[in-house]
Image (tube, rainbow, N blue to C red):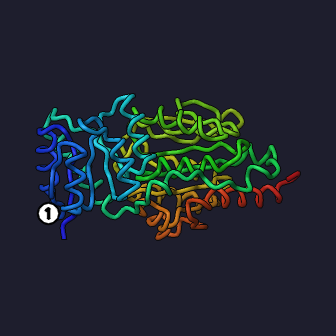
Amino acid sequence: MSIKVLIVDDSALMRALLTEIINGAPDLEVVGAAPDPIAAREMIKTLNPDVLTLDVEMPRMDGLDFLDRLMRLRPMPVIMISSFTASGSEVTLKALELGAVDYLAKPRAENISILQSYAEDIREKIRAAASAQVTSRTLIAAPPAPTLAQSKGSFSPRLLAEKVIAIGASTGGTEAIKEVLCSLPGEMPPIVMVQHMPETFTPSFAQRLNSLSKLTVIEAQGGERLQPGTAYLAPGHSHMRVKKGGGGFLLELAKDEPVNRHRPAADVLFWSVAEHVRQNGLGVILTGMGKDGAQGLLAMRQAGAWNIGQDQASCVVYGMPREAAQIGALDEVASLGDISRSILARLRAVDKHLPGG
């Protein structure tokens, strides 16, 4: 059976273009196209689509307002179609917070190859969204559960200096990363992160995480020496690697070719941690479609690192963690709410066996 898609966009041209792209895949079918959320509301009732594509700026009701109501009353997979601008990134991050599964830029018909690539992307995202686990807005809005982390003693200086935590995520990852970081104390080993998102989004995402967590969260610029209590987010335009240097670890950015169709790629980050941090690495793979990160985590584990993956029940899309689990790259699998506890338990266990720990 085909995946049924409802398009919600006030532009007749955009509705026609998206319809042509989506119907061009044998397993996808546009069952309706609504010019505004009011019309969409009725179409959802009668057409029962599997996936919704949703514009942000529309007449009669704003896309975010509609999404908020939809996720409270009839949760379903939603892909936001927005402009990739600074203001657009803020709106899209808010949409993901409200429960949207994924997002995509409005296509630019600059040339046929760009449109072909765009068509591939949206079809892949629709397929992933159709299998996504979507919960009601009330559950999404719940704050991260308090952990034992914030009340227990601090880590030894040696552990804070030697350990590096590496995180990779994709679809659903903005909220997953937020939950993990917000459940950790401010005193942690350095954290390095790859989230698949465009370069216009990563500054806003880093700022949002910084405002919500006890850690200092920044978008990496390259050349930074890793510091405890700080989380570094790879910018959307470059791969990020960890290197030895300056008596510790440094960050390096590079605009090399995409890996697993992504730049930044989680595999690139994990491979560098495997090479330079070795047994002092701690890998985390969160929700996301595809296989990025699995081979890098396997290299980390073979180098002596300890890795944890998000379980299927708590993933929006169980792709990346599944691939890592299938090839034996994980030491532990846990629900999203338990990942921070497991990280802290592992760090405390290691710290006890360090000289002076």
Q: Under tag 1, what secondary structure?
A: loop
Mark 1: few/some/many CA within 10 Å (<14, 14-19, 20+): few
**Residue 18 visible to the viewer:** yes
- Could you tell me which residue is drawn at 35 percent across and 29 percent down? 85
Residue linked to disc 1: 26
- Could you tell me which residue is drawn at 11 percent across and 44 percent down? 16
Q: Nearer the viewer, residue 218 or 255?
A: 218
Q: Nearer the viewer, residue 190 or 132?
A: 132
Q: Position of residue 332 (x, y in %)?
A: 60, 67
Q: Position of residue 151 (x, y in %)?
A: 79, 51
- Could you tell me which residue is drawn at 64 percent across and 53 percent down? 281
Quarter-of-image position of residue 2: bottom left
- Could you tell me which residue is drawn at 14 percent across and 63 percent down? 26
Amino acid under label 1? Pro
Q: Is 116 on the left or on the right of 220, as rendered?
A: left
Q: Position of residue 139 (x, y in %)?
A: 50, 57
* Image quarter in which the N terminus is found: bottom left
Number of numbered discs overlaid on the protein picture: 1
